[in-house]
Image (tube, helix red, strand yellow):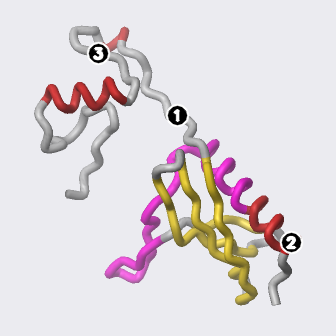
Amino acid sequence: MGQGIRVDGSGPSTGLGRKSRRRGAQLLGFPDRRGVPPAQKPELRWFAMEITEIRVAPREDGKLKGFASVTLENCFVVRGLKIIEGQGRLFVAMPSRKRDDGTFQDVAHPITPEFRDELEQAVIGEYNRVLESEPVD
């Protein structure tokens, strides 16, 4: 535990046999790369996940302006996003947990800056829409 597993089946052991990992990679749309020299292997790129639902619960608690949950591809939910008022703008903080040394570590977070921007804009947009329709007391 603690080691990542890439969706193409490479990397640390997944507990699955080689054929199962290869079949999983094919189901995800990755090409079969057996026997292909490294220089000719296709570059793995991030793929855009569609944000299919955003739920926002506005609050007035100092700099904390609300909580949000985001559903990706109608199959994965991330809860506990915080909408925070920063230096002249709103931003979205990802869910985190407190470590033994007192620091915080994100539980889930975007890997690419492009998706982070897309996620933040979508959550803040929904927050503003909800505020217009039902003001916070």
Q: Amino acid at mark 2?
A: Ser
Left or right of 2 in this view: 46: right
Where residue 58 appears, as percent x and y from the top left, is 72, 78
**Label drawn at residue 33:** 3
92 vs 79, nearest the viewer: 79
Q: Are marks 3 and 1 in contact (CB under 8 Å)?
A: no
Which mark sits nearer the N-terminus, 2 or 3? Answer: 3
Q: Is residue 5 above or below residue 99?
A: above
Q: Which residues are magenta?
A: 96-123
Classify 100 as above or below 120. below
Q: Which residue is mark 2?
A: 133
Q: Is residue 93 left or right of residue 28?
A: right
The correct choice, above or below, for 17 with respect to 88 in the image is above
User: Compared with residue 70, is residue 34 higher up or lower down, i.e. above or below?
Assistant: above
Per the image, label 3 sits on a secondary structure element best described as loop
The residue identified by callout 1 is 47
How far apart are labels 3 and 1 at the CA level? 19 Å
Mark 1: which secondary structure?
loop
Residue drawn at (35%, 17%) of the image: 31
- Percent across and percent down for residue 48 are 57, 37
Magenta residue check for 100: yes
Residue 111 picture location, percent across and down: 50, 47
The image quarter in which residue 91 lies? bottom right
**Which residue is found at the position 43% from the left and 69% from the top?**
105
**Amino acid under disc 3:** Arg
Assess disc 1: are there few (<14), some (14-19) or many (≥20) residues with their C-alpha within 10 Å of its C-alpha: few
Mark 2 or mark 3, whichever is nearer to me: 2
Cα distance between the residues tagged 1 and 2: 33 Å
**Which quadrant of the view contains residue 90?**
bottom right
Q: Residues within 10 Å of mark 2 (few under 14, many from 20)?
A: few
